[in-house]
Amino acid sequence: MKELELARDHISIDYGPVEFKKSKTELWLPWTAEIFLDLHGHHYHHRHTLSNYALFDVATDNRISAPKSVPVEDDDKPATDPNKRPQ
């Protein structure tokens, strides 16, 4: 781009398997990332090496059971008044 004086812009990312032993999980994650720039007449090269990954997860335990039984009110009995105090 002539306005920015950017002659070259390139990013290269190498992926590989990363094993998380505690959770027995393997994910393909970036191992290295490189950036190449030719900007304002200067050449730039930057390399990142990634390691020491941490895996965060939340374990949940769901238990499904039958609903608790609720006593059925008899229609013949008068409903109790919640505002009335016991004597």
Image: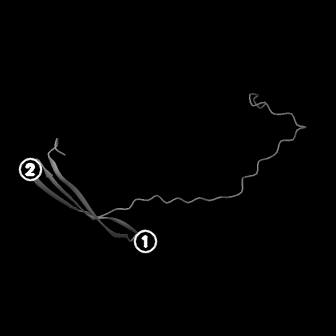
In the depicted structure, whether residue 79 falls above or below residue 38? above
In this view, the residue farthest toward the front is 2
> Label 1, label 2: how many angstroms apart (C-alpha)?
49 Å
List x then y, in percent, for residue 64: 65, 58
- Give x and y (percent) for residue 56: 40, 59
Task: Tell me if residue 40 comes above or below residue 79 in the rendering.
Answer: below
Classify mark 1: helix, strand or loop: loop
Q: Which residue is mark 2?
A: 41
- In the drawing, what numbered circle is on residue 24? 1
Dot 2: what SS? loop
The residue that appears at 34% across and 69% down in the rendered structure is 18
Query: Badge 2 local density, few (<14 within 10 Å), some, or many (20+)?
Result: few
Q: Residue at x 9, y 52 (%)?
A: 42
60 left or right of 65 in image: left
> Where is residue 49 shown, x and y percent of the image?
23, 63
The quadrant holding residue 22 is bottom left
Q: Residue at x 78, y 30 (%)?
A: 81
Q: Amino acid at mark 2?
A: Gly
Q: Nearer the viewer, mark 1 or mark 2?
A: 2
Where is 75 relative to 50, above or below? above
31, above or below 66, in the image: below
**Residue 9 location, x and y as percent?**
20, 53
Closer to the camera in the image, 62 or 12: 12
